[in-house]
Image (spheres, helix red, strand yellow):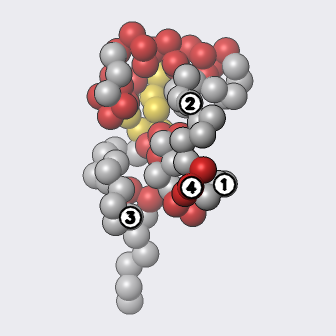
């Protein structure tokens, strides 16, 4: 039987192999932004009710970034893209 690839195993996915949840610091490294900027984006996410910022979940007293949410934020999940490749980048700022 053929194994169906999971989100983290899709060919060409640069986040493949990362854990299902990342620390804010690990997400900052993936995004190539500073730790402070990542926490600021996490704060924006929480204050906006998830409308913008860095997607985080609270586990006890810790913040974690779900890998699948990071993939969606970066438009790495090809099947969930709501726009054509030619439109990529127009008005899709991270912050």
Quarter in which the N terminus is drawn: bottom left
Q: Which mark is residue 86?
A: 4
Nearer mark to the viewer, of 2 and 3: 2
Instruction: Report, in whole angstroms, how far the alpha carbon at label 2 lies from the one at label 3.
Output: 24 Å
Q: Which mark is residue 93?
A: 2
Whichever of callouts 2 and 3 sits on the residue coming sooner in the sequence is: 3
Crowding around mark 4 (Cα neighbors within 10 Å: few <14, some 14 to 19, many 20+) is: few
- Badge 2: residue crowd in 10 Å (few <14, some 14–19, many ≥20): few
Q: Which mark is residue 10?
A: 3
Residue at position x 69%, y 28% in the image: 51
In the image, 23 versus 50, the foreground residue is 50
Which of the two discs, 1 and 3, labels the residue nearer the N terminus?
A: 3
Q: Residue 70, position in %: x, y?
A: 47, 40
Q: Give 88 or 53, whichever is nearer the viewer.
A: 88
Compared with 47, 6 (above or below) is: below
Frontmost of labels 3 and 4 is 4
Badge 4 marks a residue whose secondary structure is helix
* Res 58 visible: no
- Residue 91 in percent (x, y) is at 63, 35
Q: Earlier in the sequence, mark 3 or mark 4?
A: 3
Q: Label 3 to label 4, Cα distance in Å?
A: 22 Å
Tag nearer the camera, 1 or 4: 4
Q: What residue lies at 56% left-to-right and 14% top-to-bottom? A: 43
């Amino acid at each position: 039987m053929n194994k169906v690839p999971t989100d983290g195993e899709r060919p060409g996915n640069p986040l493949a192999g990362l854990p299902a949840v990342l620390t804010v610091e690990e997400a900052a490294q993936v995004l190539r932004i500073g730790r402070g900027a990542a926490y600021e984006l996490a704060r924006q996410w929480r204050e906006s009710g998830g409308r913008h910022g860095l997607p985080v979940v609270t586990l006890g007293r810790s913040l974690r970034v779900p890998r699948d949410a990071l993939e969606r934020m970066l438009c790495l999940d090809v099947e969930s893209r709501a726009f054509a490749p030619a439109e990529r980048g127009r008005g899709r700022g991270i912050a």
